[in-house]
Amino acid sequence: MSLLPKSRKARRRLMVVVTAAPILAAAAALAFYALGNSVSFFYSPIQAKAAHVPAGRTIELGGLVEKGSVVKKPDGSITFVIADRAATSKVVYRGDLPDLFREGQGVVTKGAFQADGDFEASEVLAKHDERYMPREVTRALKASGEWRGDGDKQAGA
C-alpha cells in the first residue's frame, strides 16, 4: 500500500508542499533570528530585578529620577537613580542629558546592566511637557503604585 496519492495531479501538489515547507520554515527562522537582536524590552526597576535581566542585554529602563540622586562626575559621566516604589536602579550615562531632564520626573533610558549591577545608559529620554509620559512608564508606575498623575503638582500637595 503506497502513501502517495494515486492521482498524478495530487502527487504533484504534495511534492510542491513537501518542497516548499522546509524553505518557508527556514525563511521564518532566519527572519525571527534577525529580529531577535533588534527587540528592546521595557522594564521598571522592580520588573528588571524580578526578571534577572542578564548583564549586557539591551533593554529600556524607566521610572522616576530620584530627587537628590543626580551626580555629575569630573570624567564627564552622570549618575542618577531611577526609582519606583519597590526598587531603585543606579544609572551611569556619558553624554548630554535632554534639556527637560530633572529630578522627580519620568525618564526612559536605553542601555544594559553591567556585571556590577549598575545600568549603563546609551540614551536618555525625558518627557516633553508637564502632562506627557511614555505609555510604558505610565503603566509601570501605576502598577507599582507610584503614579502621581500630574508630576510635580501632586508632589507638593
Image (cartoon, rainbow, N blue to C red):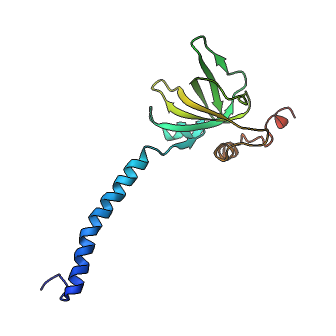
The image quarter containing residue 109 is top right
Residue in the picture at 73% in, 27% down: 102
Q: Position of residue 15 (x, y in %)?
A: 22, 75
The image quarter containing residue 13 is bottom left
Quick check: 69 left or right of 95? right
Q: Position of residue 66 (x, y in %)?
A: 69, 27
Q: Furthest-bottom residue in view?
A: 7
Query: Which quadrant of the rendered structure holds the N terminus?
Result: bottom left
Query: Which quadrant of the rendered structure holds the C terminus?
Result: top right
Q: Is residue 63 above or below residue 67?
A: below
Q: Furthest-top residue in view?
A: 74
Q: Furthest-right residue in view?
A: 157
Q: How many marks?
A: 0
Q: Nearer the viewer, residue 146 or 68?
A: 68
Quick check: 87 left or right of 31? right
Q: Position of residue 148 (x, y in %)?
A: 77, 40
Residue in the picture at 54% in, 28% down: 119
Q: Position of residue 20 (x, y in %)?
A: 28, 68
Residue in the picture at 50% in, 30% down: 113
Q: Is residue 145 above or below residue 11?
A: above
Q: Nearer the viewer, residue 113 or 15?
A: 15
